[in-house]
Image (spheres, rainbow, N blue to C red):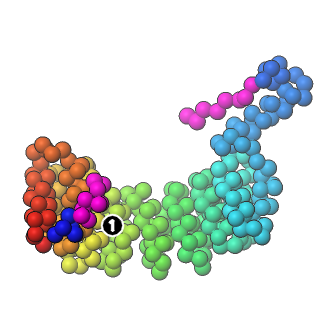
């Protein structure tokens, strides 16, 4: 069991305030220097990055032949809150961009979190590029519109794991419990992205359902999911944690030991919790030569 012990040890325990820059000429409020200083201060107030950009010029860079420069332009527009920055991104996406640039532009649109981006994002959630679709799904996850919710839920049926992973991230952020059955079905197919998402949205009843999936879900993925549930301080009464620990004890391999190691590291050694005592016993049995 030295290999397992080394594996476990190696795994380890697991207002914006914006100030106008002042100068004597600005403070006096007279002359050309004073006007320029006030304009510069206003521009910075509109742009969280603190640097004003020429929106029209940056928009033009989105269509350049240099994809790196175009992606950088998209990033600038995503960070900027100057008038026209979001519109520049949406207009460029509506006209069409190289997939790599489009992915970054969609990511930038998501940083704005604006409902005005809904139609464009829904369109790109069906793009031929899986990377673009994934970015669109993630950006849609920041919108509360029912159409956005429907689109992100629909992404669970995407053929590409990256898109399904984006859908899982959205469900995790929203704690979208109605998608639990869909995620369990994908978990049974070995979709790793569902493990953490299910752990976040889990209720006591859902945790029990997942704990009963031994033999139906790949061992390492199931152990990851149960282990993440075990680390939640708000899952329910102590008996829920005991059930999860016992389920982990029935799963073969190294993954459940790693999960139990993380739990033991998170709960004080002198804790009177039954789940910790049983986790310690299983841990010692495994490292001592058990299954």
Q: Describe residue 178's horizontal placement relative to residue 212 as left or right.
A: right
Residue 208 image point, x, y percent: 19, 64
Q: Residue 21 lies in magenta, yes or no?
A: yes
Q: Residue 67 lies in magenta, yes or no?
A: no
**Residue at point 37% right, 75% down?**
191
Picture quadrant of residue 199: bottom left
Span highlighted in magenta in the image: 6-22
Q: Which residue is mark 1?
A: 195
Q: Is residue 206 visible?
A: no
Q: Describe residue 90's horizontal placement relative to residue 234 as left or right.
A: right
**Residue at point 33% right, 80% down?**
189
Question: Looking at the image, how many numbered discs can be counted on the residues?
Answer: 1
Q: Describe residue 276's horizontal placement relative to residue 56 as left or right.
A: left
Q: Which type of secondary structure does the marked residue at label 1 adopt?
A: helix
**Residue at point 20% right, 78% down?**
215
Question: Which residue occupies the foreground of this view, 7 or 150?
Answer: 7
In the image as oriented, which residue stretches furthest toward the right? 31
Residue 284 image point, x, y percent: 11, 60
Picture quadrant of residue 57: bottom right
Type of secondary structure dominating the magenta stretch: loop
Q: Quadrant of the N terminus?
A: bottom left
Residue 210 image point, x, y percent: 23, 68
> Is 104 above or below relative to 215?
above
In the image as oriented, which residue stretches furthest toward the front? 2
Q: Quadrant of the C terminus?
A: bottom left
Q: Is residue 61 visible?
A: yes
Q: Sort mark 1 into few (<14), some (14-19) or many (20+) by Cα contacts within 10 Å.
A: many
**Residue at point 75% right, 25% down?**
22
Question: Which residue occupies the foreground of this view, 62 or 46?
Answer: 62
Question: Which residue occupies the foreground of this view, 135 or 75?
Answer: 75
């Amino acid at each position: 069991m030295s290999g397992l012990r080394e594996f476990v040890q190696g795994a380890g325990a697991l207002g914006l305030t914006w100030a106008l820059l002042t100068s004597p000429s600005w403070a006096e409020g007279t002359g050309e220097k004073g006007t320029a200083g006030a304009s510069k201060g206003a521009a910075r107030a509109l742009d969280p990055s603190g640097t004003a950009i020429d929106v029209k010029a940056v928009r033009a860079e989105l269509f350049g032949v240099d994809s790196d420069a175009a992606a950088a332009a998209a990033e600038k527009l995503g960070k900027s809150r100057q008038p026209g920055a979001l519109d520049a991104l949406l207009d460029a996406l509506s006209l069409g961009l190289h997939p790599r640039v489009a992915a970054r532009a969609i990511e930038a649109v998501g940083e704005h979190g604006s409902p005005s981006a809904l139609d464009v994002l829904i369109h790109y959630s069906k793009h031929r590029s899986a990377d673009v679709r994934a970015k669109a799904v993630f950006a849609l996850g920041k919108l509360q519109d029912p159409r956005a919710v429907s689109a992100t839920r629909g992404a669970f049926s995407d053929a590409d794991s990256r898109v399904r992973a984006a859908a899982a991230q959205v469900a995790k952020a929203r704690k979208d419990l109605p998608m639990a059955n869909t995620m369990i079905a994908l978990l049974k197919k070995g979709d790793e992205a569902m493990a953490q998402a299910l752990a976040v949205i889990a209720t006591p009843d859902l945790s029990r359902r997942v704990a009963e999936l031994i033999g139906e879900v790949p061992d390492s993925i199931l152990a990851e999911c149960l282990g993440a549930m075990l680390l939640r301080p708000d899952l329910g009464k102590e008996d829920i944690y005991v059930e999860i620990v016992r389920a982990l004890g029935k799963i073969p391999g190294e993954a459940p030991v790693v999960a139990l190691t993380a739990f033991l590291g998170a709960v004080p050694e002198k804790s009177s919790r039954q789940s910790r005592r049983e986790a310690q016993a299983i841990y010692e049995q495994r490292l001592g030569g058990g299954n």
